[in-house]
């Protein structure tokens, strides 16, 4: 019986030693691989030690910020450039359109850049003459620009009725303030007093022939081709024959 107790005590001692050795081995393994500080197995904490925000900063976020800045700069440049171009274009366009119209209205040749110097004459104009009821013994001379460019009706026309040797006198008080410029299709007018109403004129005669000559810029004589104007019936003229300067309105031509 005593031997049985001795064997049980020895066996118990061996088992206890084995358990102690196993416990020491487990403790050593755990010391080599410590658990994380937060106690979550297999998780690595990204909490910054200085207390800054825990939100991670990624490369993608940085790229987005850079792209936004670049796009903003580009958009700003594009908007500014477009605005400047619109402003410049508007100014240039408005100035060009206005200048061309003004030049034509102020007497510039169509398609030319300088002022009109071309004289109206028998080659680029048509001339007609008609009798009027008032004033008595008066006729209305009309010149129409039939050319493709503007021309000037300078001073007054030189008239030759029949075989007359000289041109009739002009009413100086009818001289306009500016040269009459005719665009294609436009007309100018001159009043013609053929004879005196009271019979005071001398050297009267009747004719169906009329030739009209035009003056140039200098006004020193006729220029260009003359115009032969047909008369529907004979016209009586005498020494009081007179003509007005070219006018833009027929009423102004018949005031003298």
Image (cartoon, helix red, strand yellow):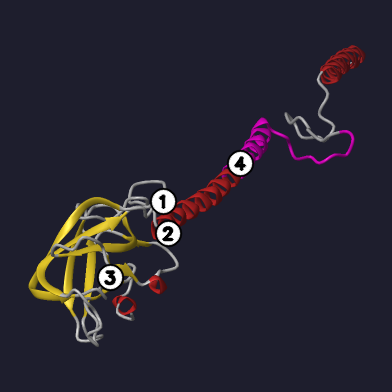
Which stretch appears magenta?
A: 49-78
Quick one: which residue is furthest to the left in this view?
233
Left or right of 225 on screen, residue 87: right
Q: Position of residue 142 (x, y in %)?
A: 23, 69
Task: Specify the quadrant of the image occupied by residue 16.
Answer: top right
Left or right of 126 on screen, residue 11: right
Label 1, label 4: how far apart the Cα atoms are: 45 Å
Above/below status of 155 relative to 136: above
Q: Position of residue 229 (x, y in %)?
A: 14, 64
Q: Nearer the viewer, residue 91 or 161?
A: 161
Q: Position of residue 224 (x, y in %)?
A: 24, 49
Above/below status of 92 relative to 199: above
Q: Give the secondary structure at mark 4.
A: helix
Q: Is residue 182 magenta?
A: no
Foreground tag (3 vs 1)? 3
Residue matched to label 1: 115
Residue matched to label 3: 189
Q: Quick one: label 4 or label 3, which is nearer the N terminus? A: 4
Left or right of 193 on screen, residue 15: right
Foreground tag (4 vs 2)? 2
Count up the numbered dots.
4
Residue matched to label 4: 77
Q: Give the secondary structure at mark 2.
A: loop
Above/below status of 45 relative to 150: above
Residue matched to label 2: 106
Foreground tag (4 vs 3)? 3
Name the residue at 13% across, 65% down: 162
Q: Quick one: label 4 or label 2, which is nearer the N terminus? A: 4
Label 3, label 2: how far apart the Cα atoms are: 20 Å
Q: Quick one: label 3 or label 1, which is nearer the N terminus? A: 1
**Label 2 with label 1: CB-CB less than 8 Å:** yes
Q: Is residue 67 magenta?
A: yes
């Amino acid at each position: 019986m005593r031997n049985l107790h001795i064997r049980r005590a020895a066996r118990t001692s061996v088992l206890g030693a084995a358990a102690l050795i196993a416990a020491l081995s487990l403790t050593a393994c755990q010391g080599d691989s410590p658990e994380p500080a937060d106690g979550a197995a297999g998780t690595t904490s990204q909490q910054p030690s200085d207390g800054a925000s825990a939100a991670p900063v990624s490369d993608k976020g940085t790229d987005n910020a850079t792209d936004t800045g670049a796009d903003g700069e580009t958009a700003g440049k594009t908007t500014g450039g477009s605005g400047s171009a619109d402003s410049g274009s508007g100014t240039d366009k408005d100035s060009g359109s206005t200048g061309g119209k003004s030049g034509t209205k102020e007497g510039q040749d169509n398609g030319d850049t300088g002022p009109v110097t071309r004289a109206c004459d028998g080659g680029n104009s048509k001339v007609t003459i008609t009798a009027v009821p008032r004033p008595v013994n008066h006729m209305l001379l009309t010149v129409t620009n039939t050319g493709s460019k503007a021309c000037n009706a300078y001073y007054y026309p030189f008239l030759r009725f029949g075989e007359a040797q000289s041109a009739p006198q002009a009413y100086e008080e009818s001289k306009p303030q500016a040269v009459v410029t005719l665009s294609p299709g436009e007309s100018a007018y001159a009043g013609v007093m053929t004879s005196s109403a009271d019979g005071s004129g001398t050297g009267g005669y009747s004719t169906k022939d009329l030739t009209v000559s035009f003056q140039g810029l200098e006004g020193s004589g006729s220029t260009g081709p003359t115009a032969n104007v047909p008369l529907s019936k004979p016209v009586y003229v005498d020494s009081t024959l007179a003509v007005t300067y070219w006018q833009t309105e027929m009423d102004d031509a018949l005031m003298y």
